[in-house]
Image (tube, rainbow, N blue to C red):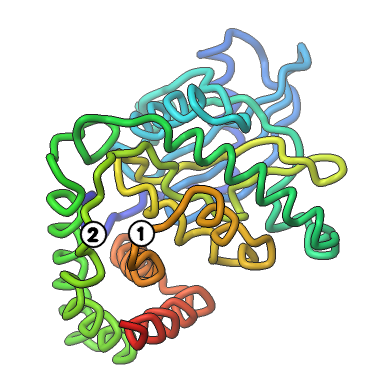
Amino acid sequence: MKVERIEALPLTKEQTLGYARIAVREKLGKPAGNVRYMGGGSFGRAVSVQCTDGQSLVVKFLRAKDMMEKEAHDLKLLAKYSTVRVPDVLFTRRGDEKIPVDCYGMERIEGKSSLFALGMLLIGKKRRKEFADQVTTALHAIHSCKNDKFGDTMNADCDGWLDYYRPFAAEVLRQAEAYFAAGKLEEKIILAMRAAWEKFDVIFSEEVKEACLIHGDLNVGNIMVGKGYRITGFIDPLNSAYADREYDLFQFDNLTGKRFFLRETYLKKYGASRYCMQKLAFYGLWNEVYCYIKSGVLINFIMNPLVKNMNERLKEL
């Protein structure tokens, strides 16, 4: 994973609607009927398209170079193993004079993100545990895909997990130090990172023996639910890799994930390494700083709990 600031290409909401119509006409050979802007993050924009023949799909635009091929590749790979639906990729399209950014089309998953399905917060404990059981079963099925090497799904070439992860973590810390020196990163964040780095060899002392396929960003925001809050799909993988399977678990505690017992359920069903909780704290903090380095956006309501958790977990060593 490259650790660098990415300059997002300009793309307005209005432009995405027009570009979606062009892409669907070119790639599927049919006119788009209704188009609706769905939103997006630092580098992606999504448009819902209802074709005149009734087909529903989502066109996703990537405002950073070299993201489309990997996202499409990873969606196809995850779909082979997940017991929960992952959207089929319908087409990919590289940017040109007509559409200046890369985009791809995928099937529309029914329902909405479980993060924004507010009724999910009101369902009883039994149903929340059933939700967790289904999510973790599907994730474990993804983890059943193994590889001889660790690393990116498109170019795994490392013999050990730390051969891949340690250089990445070191570079994130190096750049975090530079941002701190420039007054762009809070002291409490860099102090937690320094303390965790001192304990790196302890936290990661247990060898990761299997290179497992991971989703990379499976938090409640990327789990779709439909009628009756039944799970309808997993969306938006990020930095999928052949990795330590526990690298997929720190996202379970983000946002409203703790209410659904996701991380606890996975570890109870499939086991944990000796320093699992310290690893998850490390993974979570480093990932959020990495996202800040890439985008320039620091989200305090996510970052602050990660810093607190890292400090608490270090006290347990």
Report which residue position mark 1 lands on.
273
x, y percent for residue 82: 54, 30
x, y percent for residue 86: 57, 30
x, y percent for residue 112: 73, 45
Question: Mark 1–mark 2 contact, CB under 8 Å?
Answer: yes
Residue in the image at 25% along x and 70% along y: 203
Foreground of the two, 204 or 109: 204
Residue in the image at 81% along x and 53% along y: 127
Q: Write down the quadrant of residue 120 in the picture.
A: bottom right
Residue in the image at 28% along x and 55% along y: 6
Mark 1 residue crowding within 10 angstroms, few (<14) / some (14–19) / many (20+):
some
Badge 2 element = loop
Mark 1 or mark 2: whose residue is earlier in sequence: 2
Q: Amino acid at mark 2?
A: Glu
Report which residue position mark 2 lands on.
206
Badge 1 element = loop
In this rendering, position of residue 8 left or right of residue 217: left
In the image, residue 281 sits, relative to residue 104, either above or below, namely below
